[in-house]
Image (spheres, grey):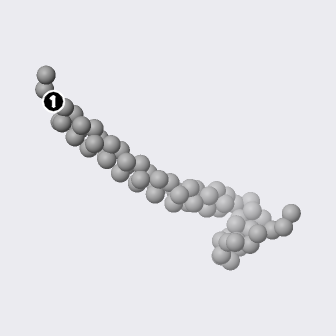
């Protein structure tokens, strides 16, 4: 299996040394990546919910009274 070397040199060295020394630095690195990945999705979801609630309120106000 060919190895991919897509990380910056500091990240690669940090991950390798953490594994060799039995440290849990890799877990922190993974948590940071997931945190950075989740923020844009949460922001888009928040905007979507706000838009939906505004649309729903507008629809309720436009209904004719019977």
Which residue was labeled with disc 1? 64
Image coords of residue 43 (percent x, y): 40, 54
Identify the residue shown where x is 37% and y is 48%.
48
Q: Residue furthest right?
A: 1
Image coords of residue 19 (percent x, y): 75, 62
Identify the residue shown where x is 57% and y is 60%.
33
Horizontal placement of 46 versus 34: left or right? left
Horizontal placement of 24 versus 32: left or right? right
Horizontal placement of 42 versus 49: left or right? right
Identify the residue shown where x is 51% and y is 60%.
36
Give the quadrant of residue 27.
bottom right
Image coords of residue 13 (percent x, y): 71, 73
Front residue of 59/28: it is: 59
Note whether 9 is above or below 23 in the view shown: below
Note whether 54 is above or below 35 in the view shown: above
Q: Which corner quadrant holds the N terminus?
A: bottom right
* Element type at mark 1: loop
Q: Which corner quadrant holds the C terminus?
A: top left
Front residue of 34/53: it is: 53
Q: Could you tell me if residue 28 is visible in this image?
A: no
Front residue of 50/4: it is: 50
Note whether 33 is above or below 45 in the view shown: below
Identify the residue shown where x is 26% and y is 44%.
54
Front residue of 23/37: it is: 37
Give the quadrant of residue 2.
bottom right
Horizontal placement of 63 versus 36: left or right? left
Q: Could you tell me if residue 10 is visible in this image?
A: yes
Q: Residue furthest left?
A: 65
């Amino acid at each position: 299996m060919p190895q991919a070397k897509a990380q910056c040199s500091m990240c690669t060295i940090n991950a390798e040394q953490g594994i060799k020394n039995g440290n849990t630095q890799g877990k922190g690195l993974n948590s940071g990546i997931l945190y950075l990945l989740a923020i844009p999705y949460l922001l888009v979801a928040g905007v979507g919910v706000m838009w939906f609630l505004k649309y729903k309120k507008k629809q309720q106000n436009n209904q004719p009274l019977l």
